[in-house]
Image (cartoon, rainbow, N blue to C red):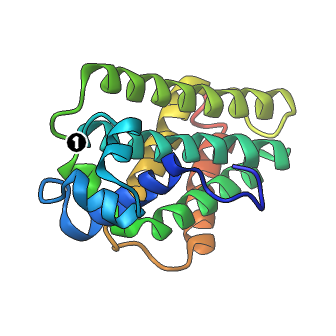
Amino acid sequence: MAAGQPPNKRDVILHSAMQVFSRKGFHDSTMEDVAQEAGVGKGTVYLYFPSKQALIEEIFRYSINLYVDAVDKMSQDHTCLRTQLEAILVHVLAMAERNQQASGLFLEGATGMSEEFKGWVIDSKSILLDRYADLLAQATQRGQIRLVDVRMWAHLIAGGVDSLVTTVLWGKAAPDHHRLAQQVVDAWWSGLMSRELNA
C-alpha cells in the first residue's frame, strides 16, 4: 500500500481479523465479528476470504512475509554480517513485540491448516534459509568470517531467531531488543570466527 493512500478493504479485513481473533480467540470468532470490526458486510469478508481458515492462513502469510522482507531490507542496508544480523534480530523482535496480542493465534489457528498452506510455510522457511546462507557466503567472500557450512549456520541462525521470536510473542523476553540481539549475535560470532571449530 502506497503512503498516503487509504487502506484497501482486503487489508482492513485482514487487520480486523487479527484484532478479533486476538481478542475473542480464533475458534470463538465468527466472520460476522470480523465484518463488524472492519465496518463492512459479511458478504464483503467472504468476497476476499472464503473461510475463517483462509483468513488465519493469510494472517500467517502476512507475518512470514514481513519477516522475509525485514531480512532482505537489513541485508541491503548493511554490508557487515555482524551488523546485518543484529539489525535483522532487533527488527524482527520489535515486530514480534508489536504483535504479541496475536501470539495465541499461532497455536490456536495452527490446527486444520491446509496442505497447500503447509507447503507454502515450508517454502517460506526455505527462502529464509537461503537468505541467511547467502549472507554467510557473502561474509565469507569478504573475509569477515571463517569458511563455514553456510547451510548449517543458516539453520542455527533461523532457529535462534524463531526461538527468540516465540519468547517475545509469549511476553517472556527481555525488553531491550538491542541488548538481546547483541548478546545473541556475540554468541553466533564467536562460533563463526573460531578457528578451533573449523573442521
Does residue 110 appear in this view? yes
Does residue 103 appear in this view? no
Residue visible at 26% across and 20% down in the picture: 115
Q: Position of residue 153 (x, y in %)?
A: 55, 33
Q: Position of residue 89 (x, y in %)?
A: 59, 57
Residue visible at 41% across and 72% down in the picture: 173
Q: Position of residue 139 (x, y in %)?
A: 78, 35
Does 5 appear above or below 147? below
Count of marks overlaid on the render: 1
In the drawing, does residue 161 fall left or right of residue 196? left
Q: Amino acid at mark 1?
A: Ala
Residue visible at 38% across and 45% down in the picture: 44
User: Residue 143 or 132: which is nearer the viewer?
Assistant: 132
Secondary structure beneath label 1: loop
Q: Position of residue 16 (x, y in %)?
A: 40, 61
In the drawing, does residue 41 fall left or right of residue 7? left
Does 84 appear above or below 137? below
Farthest-out residue, left: 28
What residue is shown with label 1? Answer: 110
Does 12 appear above or below 143? below
Instruction: Give residue 105's quadrant in the image.
Output: bottom left
Which quadrant is the C terminus positioned in? top right
In the drawing, does residue 181 fall left or right of residue 35? right
Residue visible at 29% across and 50% down in the picture: 42
Instruction: Give residue 58's quadrant in the image.
Output: top left
Instruction: Give residue 129's quadrant in the image.
Output: top right
